[in-house]
Image: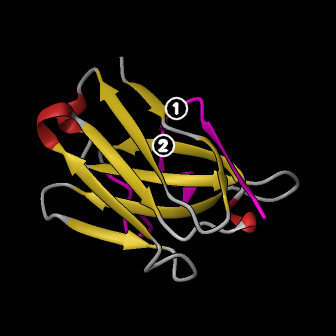
């Protein structure tokens, strides 16, 4: 059984940085796609960044590229999201997701079967 666990959320002032971690276990070696999503209150869940490990290939939301970076430690089956220059509008619950194959839409939440519980990120002005 696959388990996905996020950590690293918290509160930070605008302009600050946070690094989120996501550990996958249980058939983790088969989870070639790992991704970060976020959901703010009253909004739909949106893709932030994804990584295809055999490449590796990385995918980013156009609006976040340049501030957020996804990386992975294969030995630890852990993926990270480094978030810099944070803005109040980045406030959301951040979720990690994983799957074996997601087709041609690595930033679509509908393509992922395995999800973590989420970690809250709050950015104050």
Badge 1, how many Cα within 10 Å: few under 14, some, many 20+? Answer: some
- The one nearer the camera, 43 or 80, is 80
| The label number, if any, that marks residue 116 in the structure image | 1
Q: Is residue 116 left or right of residue 104?
A: right
The mark nearer the N terminus, 2 or 1, is 2
Boundaries of the magenta span: 101-125
Reading the image, the residue beneath label 2 is 96
Local SS, label 1:
loop
x, y (%) of residue 15?
Answer: 60, 69
Q: Is residue 77 left or right of residue 48?
A: left
- The one nearer the camera, 108 or 45, is 45
Asked whether disc 2 touches disc 1, contact meaning CB atoms under 8 Å apart, the reply is: yes
| The C terminus: image quadrant | bottom right
x, y (%) of residue 124?
Answer: 76, 57
Residue at 56%, 54% in the rendered image? 37
Q: CA distance from mark 2 to mark 1?
A: 5 Å
């Amino acid at each position: 059984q696959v388990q996905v666990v996020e950590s690293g959320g918290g509160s930070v002032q605008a302009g600050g940085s946070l690094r989120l971690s996501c550990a996958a276990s249980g058939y983790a070696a088969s989870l070639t796609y790992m991704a970060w999503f976020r959901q703010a209150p009253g909004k739909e869940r949106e893709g932030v960044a994804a990584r295809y490990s055999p490449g590796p290939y990385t995918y980013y939301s156009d609006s976040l590229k340049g501030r957020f970076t996804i990386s992975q430690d294969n030995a630890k089956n852990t993926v990270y999201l480094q978030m810099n220059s944070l803005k109040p509008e980045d406030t959301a619950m951040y979720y990690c997701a994983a799957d074996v194959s997601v087709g041609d839409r690595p930033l679509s939440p509908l393509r992922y079967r395995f999800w973590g519980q989420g970690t809250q990120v709050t950015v104050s002005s």
